[in-house]
């Protein structure tokens, strides 16, 4: 839960810095980021490689760009 709380704080900061994101569902964005992060970590461990983290970052950027 502490990681989710940290992601929430970072999301709040991001939404304040970029007003174009203000219309997004804050909790939905936090959940999406958390799932991408945790999935990327699990997959990176399984494959012993960093590509899952890189793909998760790309996916988050794409999600925000469409917002």
Image (cartoon, rainbow, N blue to C red):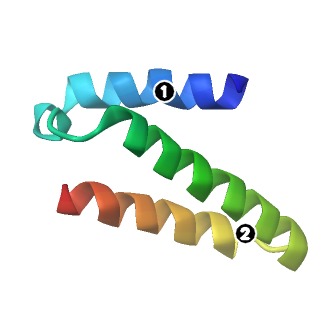
**Mark 1 element type:** helix
Residue occupying the point 34% across, 33% down: 26
* Nearer to the camera, 46 or 35: 35
Q: Position of residue 50 (x, y in %)?
A: 73, 69
Please give the residue where the numbered disc 2 appears in the rendered image.
50
Residue found farthest to the left? 20
Q: Are marks 2 and 1 in contact (CB under 8 Å)?
A: no
Q: Which mark is residue 63?
A: none
Location of residue 58 with respect to 16 vertically, above or below? below
Q: In the displayed structure, does residue 2 sit left or right of residue 60? A: right
Looking at the rendered image, the disc whose residue lies closer to the viewer, 2 or 1, is 1
* Residue 8 circle label: 1
> How far apart, in angstroms, are the residues tagged by discs 2 and 1?
24 Å
* Residue reaching furthest to the bottom: 47
Relative side of 20 to 25, left or right: left
Count residues near mark 1 (Cα–Cα under 10 Å), then give few for <14, some for 14-19, many for 20+.
some
The quarter of the displayed image where residue 21 is located: top left
Q: Looking at the picture, how far across and down is residue 17, in whole percent? A: 22, 26
In this view, the residue in front, 10 or 49, is 10
Q: Secondary structure at mark 2?
A: loop
Taking the image as shown, residue 28 lies to the left or right of residue 55, namely left
Q: Position of residue 12 (x, y in %)?
A: 36, 23
């Amino acid at each position: 839960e502490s990681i989710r709380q940290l992601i929430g704080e970072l999301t709040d900061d991001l939404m304040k810095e970029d007003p174009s994101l203000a219309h997004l569902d804050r909790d939905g964005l936090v959940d999406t980021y958390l799932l991408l992060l945790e999935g990327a970590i699990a997959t990176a461990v399984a494959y012993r490689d960093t590509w899952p983290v890189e793909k998760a970052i790309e996916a988050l950027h794409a999600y925000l760009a469409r917002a």
